[in-house]
Every structure is written in C-alpha cells, then in structure tokens.
Image (cartoon, helix red, strand yellow):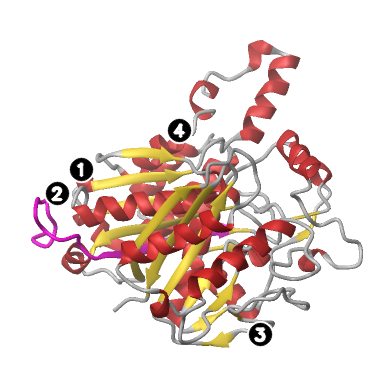
Amino acid sequence: MDGCRKGPVVGVPPRDVVVIGMGIRTALGAGVSVFTDALWSGTSGISHCAQDGLGVAARVGALDFVPSLAAMGLEAELVARARRAAGRAPRAAQVSLIATLEAWGTMGRAAREIEPRHVHLVVGGSNLELLHTYQMHEKFLAAPEYVPARYALTWMDTHLVGVVSEVLQLHGEGLTVGGASASGNVALIEGQRRVASGRCEVCVILGPMTDLSPVELRALQHTGALGGARDDVGAAEACRPFDQGRDGFIYGQGAACVILASRECAEALGVTVDGRILGGAMCLDGNHLSDPSVEGERRAMQLALEDAGIGADDVDYVNAHATSSVLGDVTELQALDEVFERGSRPVWVNGTKSFTGHCLSAAAVVEAVGVLVQLKHGFLHRNLNLTSPLDTRCQLVGPSTKEASCRLALSNAFGFGGINTSVVMGAAL
C-alpha cells in the first residue's frame, strides 16, 4: 500500500486519523446497527436485576460464543482462531472479542492487505475479570486442586491483548492502559497519537467489558455511588443524567471497539471511513478519591480542543460523561458552562449511559461509537428520563431525538482518582 508509511517521519506534520471499523456489544444487543436503532428510538437496556443484590442493571446476558461467531459471517480461518484462543475464556473476554471481530470484519477482505507489523493494539481498562477471579477464589477454597492451570493467564488484563492479537494475527505493539472509568478515552488518545505520529498505520482500540464481582458491587453500594434505589420509577427510568431526580449510576456491561487508521492508509485500502479522531487530552486534578473537579474537567476539555486545533465555538455537540451521579452531573455541567460560556451559540449535550448503564472501562469507547453513529446518521439521541433538568447554559437535547447535522463533537470521560479526559471527534469528510 503506497499510502501507508513504515514508521514515524521526522518533520512531517501529524496525519489525519480516521475510523475505519466499529463494533459493539451491550445490554441493548449485538452490533452497531442495533445500537444505532436503540439510540434513535430511545430504547434503554437497563432492566430489573436481582443478581448480586442489585435492583437494576444493564447486563449483557448469556453469550453462546460459538453460535455468535458463526452468525457474524467471518472468514473460516478467523472463526477457527477465535474458537481456539477464546473458546474457554471468561465471558467478559468473549464479549470483548465479539465486539472486536465486528469492527475488524467491517473492513472485509481489505484487512488482508494490512501488514501485521504495522497494526498496534490498545486495550483500555484494568481489573477486567473480577468476577472470574472471585469464582476462582471460591473454587480454590472448596478444592484447590481443581483450580485450572489456564487461570495463570486469564486473571491478567494482558490476556485480552494476547487473545485479540492471536485471533487477528497482529504483530505490532500491544498494551493495556488504565484510567478507571476514563480508560476508554485514554486508549483512544493513545491510539490517535500513535497513528497521527506515524508509529503505526492502523490501531485497534478496544474498550473491554468489566465484569464486577459481588464484592466490588457491594463496595460501590456502600459508597452511595450506585443508583436504582428509587421505588417510584421503573428500571428503564433509573438512570437519569442531568435530572433533579437522579440518585447514582447504574452498572452496565458492554464492550466496544474502534479501528483507527491514517487517512492515507484508509484510502489505499479502499475502506469506508466512519469518522475522525481529531485529538484529545487527559489531566489529573491531584485527588485520590472519587469526588470530581470542575477545574480538572474544564482543563481536560480545553486541552483537547487545543490538541485538535479548534475552538469551543467549533463544537456542535458534547457527549457528556453524565453518569447520573448526584455530584458528578452538577460538576460536569459547571465545567461545560465554563468551557462554552463565550460561545456564539449553545452547544448540544446528551449522555449515553441512560441507554447502556455505566460500562466502566469500556464506557468511553461505547460512547465513541455512539458519537460516531450520531454524526454519521445526522441525529442526536434524546436525554432519557430528563423530566426536571439541572440548570445549565448548554442546550440539553431533551426528551426527543433530534435530527441534526453536526460536524464536530467532544466526548468526556472522568475516572476515580482525579482522572479527566476528553476526545474530539468529527464526521467523515
């Protein structure tokens, strides 16, 4: 491929970074088309859940791995490698691989043209298999001799790097990056920088499913962070970002993948471009606890705009972190108001977690897919369950889906421990 460089070129401006593949699996169902339809129609994946003492959650549900692979229409060799590498893997790893294979499969036969050494892999997340570890601990207590040898590999986050690289036969660089609930944006920023600088031609960004055990879920309940305690609303109404009646985030399960490439490489491959990643930024606010910071969030957004070479007035739409937490939503709206206060027009704002729940490490990649499909199809999804909105100078999308031809969007993700991130995305040119 003449349009693909072999590595960084000194003195050459950063390259345009485009999205050439997307895949997703959430409580809404499997696939980008299902996800898009749910966003358009206003369908929530949150439901009643008696498991682990949760009142409501957005769980992926049972996954029959082999039939799921067969239904994807993938090449036989790819399916065979997936069965060999992940047939006995924990469910979270299987869900994550399914999302990755959807993204990879959208390139069709063009994927064969990519030199494996020029493809990097970034998995955004840490402590991904906590339920798997909990189950192995129970097995160990009952009968230590029956703990499977493969657990020596599957408890590590890098197990997913190995599985994906084996299935896709990737021979470039691979790593995991962590930033709590901002991990997905950290991965997107890392991947965008790698492609823009010429370190790689293609970068697979995976937001993996985080499978919590009863221990983590109970700890989150004890902090007061989890919502769903209200008995006057249904399960689908429990997650209420930016609403006066919110009471905490709803745990969600899901995985998503986006594949980044240089524009030159995408053109050489002849693949469809789904959107652009213009830049992004992350910063700390010097705090090890869970409370958010207006200053840290504002600074992350402003640094992201600077990195993308645009101003606040250029942004049409913000996909907010918007977890439905009592303090977090107020803090984010204050930060948004400070960033966009001098704009000539109010910026549209919505949040996707009322559809999917909070998918933790995967959340920002799930929401990146959400942003890209909205830009691509010319709509903004509604703010589900917004009946008594908080005060803001921004323009919340409101209770109905809106047709809108947006060009540039900002997507926020913030994590416990003072981690603030923001990514700038654009519609395909």
Q: Which residue is mark 3?
A: 400
Q: Is residue 289 above or below residue 35?
A: above
| Along the line of sight, the residue nearer the viewer: 273 or 278 | 278
Cα gap from disc 1 to disc 3, whole angstroms: 46 Å
Q: Which residue is mark 1?
A: 117
Say what secondary structure mark 2 lies in: loop
User: Who comes first in sequence, dot 3 or dot 4?
Assistant: 4
User: Who comes first in sequence, dot 2 or dot 3?
Assistant: 2
Cα gap from disc 4 to disc 1, whole angstroms: 20 Å
Disc number lying in front (3 or 4): 3
Magenta span of residues: 1-25
Q: What amino acid is labelled 2 in the image? A: Pro
Instruction: Please say whether residue 72 is visible from this viewpoint.
Output: no
Left or right: 41 as drawn, with respect to 169: right
Cα gap from disc 2 to disc 3, whole angstroms: 46 Å
Q: What amino acid is labelled 1 in the image? A: Arg
Q: Is residue 345 above or below residue 319?
A: below
Q: Quadrant of the C terminus?
A: bottom left
Cα gap from disc 3 to disc 4, whole angstroms: 42 Å
Q: Which residue is mark 2?
A: 8
Queried whether the magenta region covers residue 17, the answer comes back as yes
Say what secondary structure mark 4 lies in: helix
Cα gap from disc 1 to disc 2, whole angstroms: 14 Å
